[in-house]
Image: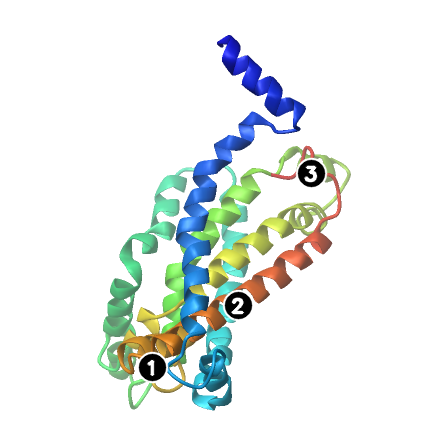
Amino acid sequence: MTTSTLAIRHRLAERGIDPQLFLLVPATVFVIALFVYPFCYGIAVSLQPAQGGALAAYRAFFTDAYQRDTITTTLGIALPAALVNVLAAVPIAYRMRGKFRGKRLLTTVLVVPITLGTVLTAEGLLGFLGPTGWFNRALLSLGVIDQPVTLTHNYTGVFLSLIITGFPFAFLLVLSYLSGIDPSLERAAATLGAGWAQRFFRITLPLLAPGLATTFCLTFVLAFSVFPSAILVGDPTGSTRVISIAAYEAAYVRYDYAAASAAAIVMGVVELVVISVVLGLRSLLYTGSTAGGKG
């Protein structure tokens, strides 16, 4: 290290600046370029409607029930889907912590939907659960039903699509958090006579709960931004008209970019509110030390 470099580091240290903080610069630039700037630009566009004042686009969105109801519709799809994905991932990831034959193959099967994408998943659902799909044909041939069961082009189709595409993310995240929990804690509890349920609910779950909160937030964001599924296997003008569809229609059907930006900003604010609530509650789930047993 040269003398000039040491001198610079000393001057920074005298001002209370850690030189290692400069390693955050690339990440900071990345966040500003891909999140902060687009968000601020969207706000600026939403405040410049063709007529009616700066807040006209927001006023029009919240006074129109057809637009406003997209918030509850999207929440009604995203929240249950994220919750089911997390709850389904916990027992499977818990059983897959140890080493056993076929673990890699089973893990691969569980995460394969990541590679499919929402469009291929929607096509698969239409081919399997559609009115003329394999599922309905099988039930009709067995005489279980008299007419096809409607499982697509409605809420059910979108919900199943979000489960298929969102579960792999939840599973991998939960598995990583479980891998960070020291297994000796459960073994110690077992030597003291604790049963499986006691070990899981009194030791593993409290340590895992903060990670579950983070997993829920990530899966919720993925589900809340649903768009292809809501159109391909949902009812985009009715029960699955989500807020992303409202933003798309405003931008590319009516060419009202202020209204589209307002819908997008509302969408982002709702996501941030839900995430803030969940992360705020996370601190109540675990209050112990982070050393030793928590990943």
Label 1, residues with CA under 10 Å away: few <14, some 14-19, many ≥20: some
Q: Which residue is more in the foreground, 11 or 254?
A: 11
How far from the left and from the top, in percent, is residue 70?
A: 45, 80
Q: What residue type is labelled 3?
A: Thr
Distance in Å between CA atoms under marks 3 and 1: 46 Å
Q: Which residue is more in the foreground, 240 or 189?
A: 240
Residue at 49 percent across and 56 percent down: it is 218
Residue, disc 3? 290
How far from the left and from the top, in percent, is residue 124?
A: 26, 67
Residue, disc 2? 269
Q: Viewed as shown, does residue 38 lie left or right of 139?
A: right
**Lower position in the chain sequence, tag 2 or tag 1:** 1
Distance in Å between CA atoms under marks 3 and 2: 31 Å
Q: How many marks?
A: 3
Q: Viewed as shown, does residue 291 lie left or right of 244?
A: right
Q: What element carries label 1?
A: loop
Residue, disc 1? 236
Residue at 38 percent across and 52 percent down: it is 110
Residue 45, can we see it? yes
Q: Which residue is more in the foreground, 100 or 216?
A: 216
**Lower position in the chain sequence, tag 3 or tag 2:** 2
Label 3, residues with CA under 10 Å away: few <14, some 14-19, many ≥20: few
Residue at 40 percent across and 52 percent down: it is 34
Distance in Å between CA atoms under marks 2 and 1: 22 Å
How far from the left and from the top, in percent, is residue 243?
A: 42, 76
